[in-house]
Amino acid sequence: MQEYGAALITGERDLTELIEAGGGEWSLTQTETHAAADDSEPRQPETHRRVLDALPLRGSRTAERLAQLAGLDPREAQRALVELELLGSAVRRETPGDAPPRWALQRRQ
């Protein structure tokens, strides 16, 4: 459901449709949204791959540190982290006090 430039994201399917539809900040190039002819699934956007590579195999990191390691603008990294969380690839961990939340890889079961 989209109204007034807003989109309701309830799961992976909604997010995938929004990314593939493009438009505004969500616009992706053809090479980012379509896999090679022999692949059956679309490729991940470059920002997703860079953020996933920056996430540690064990433990967690702040979004600011992930942005530094991935070579991305902090807002770009934060957007990718939220998308990855919705896709089930990353998990946000709240921290006590005023410390910023930390992000980790979501283990697949």
Image (cartoon, helix red, strand yellow):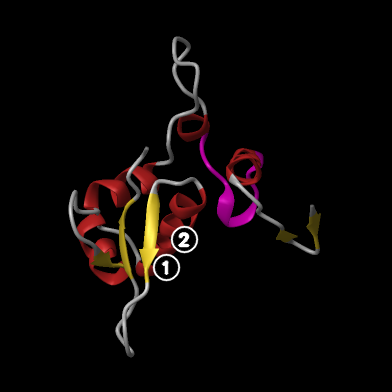
* Position of residue 62 measured from the top left corner of the image (x, y, whole percent): 27, 69
Q: Give left or right: position of 13 versus 80.
A: right
Q: CA distance from mark 1 to mark 2?
A: 6 Å
Q: Residue at x 37, y 42 (%)?
A: 46
Q: Quadrant of residue 49?
A: top left
Q: Secondary structure at mark 2?
A: helix
> Which mark, residue 57?
none
* Position of residue 96 measured from the top left corner of the image (x, y, whole percent): 31, 84
> Which mark, residue 75?
1
Q: Which residue is identified by label 2?
A: 79
Q: Secondary structure at mark 1?
A: helix
Q: Which residues are magenta?
A: 21-29
Q: Is residue 68 magenta?
A: no
User: How busy is the neighbourhood of tag 2: few (under 14 within 10 Å), some, or many (20 plus)?
Assistant: some
Q: Residue at x 46, y 22 (%)?
A: 35
Q: Is residue 27 magenta?
A: yes
